Amino acid sequence: MQPDYGESPDLLEFRAKLAAARASKRGALATMLTKRRDAAVRHAAFMALFYDGEKLRPGAEIVLDDLAEAAGFGAASPVLDHAELCFLEGKRWLLLHLLSRFRLSPERAAELQSQLENSR
């Protein structure tokens, strides 16, 4: 037990906040490391699911092409209704999220686009 030196409640509160901040920083570092490890695992899973070595799997081409068509990817929206535009943008965002999981270089992204265009 620590001796009581008659410290003010403000000082005691400050010490408690400081201890909590230090614990939070340690927790944040652990969380960041866990997220990096999880991101690497997710990336590997996406690559294994969609790629066979350097090329897209035949089924993956069909799925990605269908998703791109359903999301209206690369096409202007023919509607002006705000709610419908938000809905379409949500679909596009989901497709972009999926593609971002591949972490493609610009060259690889262009190659993927040409593969999908050639498969149509």
Image: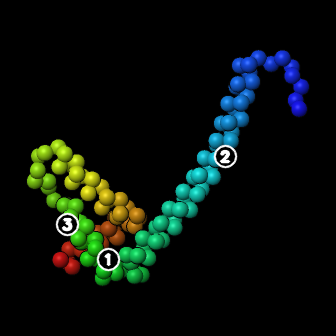
Determine contact: label 1, label 2, CB under 8 Å: no
Seen at 71% across and 35% down, the residue is 19
Task: Please indicate, yes or no, whether residue 115 appears anywhere in the rendered image.
Answer: no
Q: Amino acid at mark 2?
A: Arg
Q: Would residue 102 appear left or right of 21 to someone viewing this image?
A: left
- In primary-sequence order, the first of circles 3 and 2 is 2
Dot 1: element? helix
Q: Is residue 55 above or below residue 24?
A: below
Q: For this rendering, which residue is in front, 64 or 56?
A: 64
Q: In the figure, residue 109 lies in which quadrant?
A: bottom left
User: In the rendering, at what x and y percent does residue 38 appear?
Assistant: 53, 62
* Mark 3 to mark 2 CA distance (whole Å): 45 Å
> For mark 1, what is the residue?
60
In the image, which disc is placed on residue 26?
2
Q: Amino acid at mark 3?
A: Glu
Task: Please indicate, yes or no, whether residue 76 appears anywhere in the rendered image.
Answer: yes
In the image, which disc is placed on residue 29?
none
Mark 3 closeness class: few <14, some 14–19, many ≥20 residues within 10 Å: few
Q: Would residue 16 appear left or right of 6 to someone viewing this image?
A: left
* Mark 1 to mark 2 CA distance (whole Å): 41 Å
Q: Is residue 52 above or below residue 7?
A: below
Mark 2 closeness class: few <14, some 14–19, many ≥20 residues within 10 Å: few
Q: Is residue 3 above or below residue 53?
A: above
Q: Amino acid at mark 1?
A: Ala
Dot 3: element? helix
Seen at 46% across and 67% down, the residue is 43
Seen at 50% across and 62% down, the residue is 39
- In primary-sequence order, the first of circles 1 and 2 is 2
